Image (spheres, grey):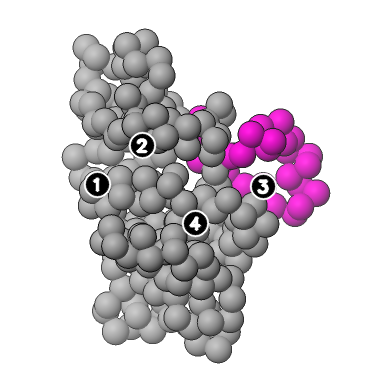
Amino acid sequence: MLIQGLGAKTIASLLKVREPGNNGILIVGSNEVALMLANTLKQLNIDVLVADYHYVQIARARMQGLRTYFGNPVSENAQSQLDLIGIGYLFAVSRDKELNTLCELQFRHEFGEQNIYRIRFAEEQDLTSRAQKQHQYIFRQLFEKDVTFSRLENMLNKQARIRITNITATYDYQHYCHDHPQAIPLFIQDKYNTLSIISTEFQPATAIGKRLIALDY
């Protein structure tokens, strides 16, 4: 079963059914924050697969038209049944922090460490690189340093919505942040639909000529 799962992408490539870019995103978790991200990515024409073992939540994801996998994404069943064709990134957004870590470890060889991100919880904000190394893995965190799961959840509870803004040389990223201090920038997308995550490594100058996707009131 393990061999079958590991060889799925190779077989798909030989049969010419694998998507060339592998720009799709596997989102672990189907809570409100995870579904907001999944629906946003879908609207941006990014392939999304939502995986979770909570039946009620994954059923809601299905009802919203999202592609889903019901079950534990690190189980033996997932190794043969989880369809990762076209998927090249992982967003670990489950409330189950242990599951997030297990998924990061499971999929880092599949996607590469540079393509694996996890949501930050408030109690993890001060987690140092040394502490991460003790777990033998340094994960990349979704969005900027002050963006936590609870902050995103609170904004959604207060009816925040996804807003898209064109960033230009005359209205750059800094201008946007000044005009929208409560907004949480999430992604940048260029005219070729290439998506960039606004994380601690984001360079504002690269946003010019692209669309900014943010959560705002």
Q: Secondary structure at mark 4?
A: loop
- Tell me whether the residue at label 4 lies in contact with that at label 2, contact meaning CB atoms closer than 8 angstroms: no
**The magenta stretch spans residue 33:** no
Q: Nearer the viewer, residue 199 or 55?
A: 55
Q: Earlier in the sequence, mark 4 or mark 3?
A: 4
- As drawn, 84 above or below 2: above
Residue receiving disc 4: 29
For image coordinates 52% across by 68% down, the residue present is: 53
Image quadrant holding the N terminus, namely bottom right
Earlier sequence position, callout 1 versus callout 3: 1
Q: For marks 1 and 4, give the one nearer the viewer.
A: 4
Disc 2 to disc 1, C-alpha distance: 10 Å
Q: Position of residue 59 (x, y in %)?
A: 38, 65
Which amino acid, mark 2? Phe
Marks 1 and 3: which is nearer the front?
Answer: 1
Which-is-in-front pick, marks 4 and 2?
4
Q: Which mark is residue 44?
A: 1
Which quadrant of the view contains residue 102? bottom right
In this rendering, is residue 21 above or below 171?
below
Magenta region = 120-144
- Residue under label 2: 187
**Label 1–label 4 contact, CB within 8 A:** no
Q: Name the residue that disc number 3 marks.
A: 138
Note whether 209 is above or below 176 in the view shown: below
For image coordinates 32% across by 24% down, the residue present is 217
Q: Secondary structure at mark 3?
A: loop
Label 4 crowd (10 A; few <14 / some 14-19 / many >=20): many
Camera sees residue 153: yes
Callout 2: 10 Å neighbours few (<14), some, many (20+)? many
Callout 3 amino acid: Ile
The amino acid sitting under disc 4 is Gly
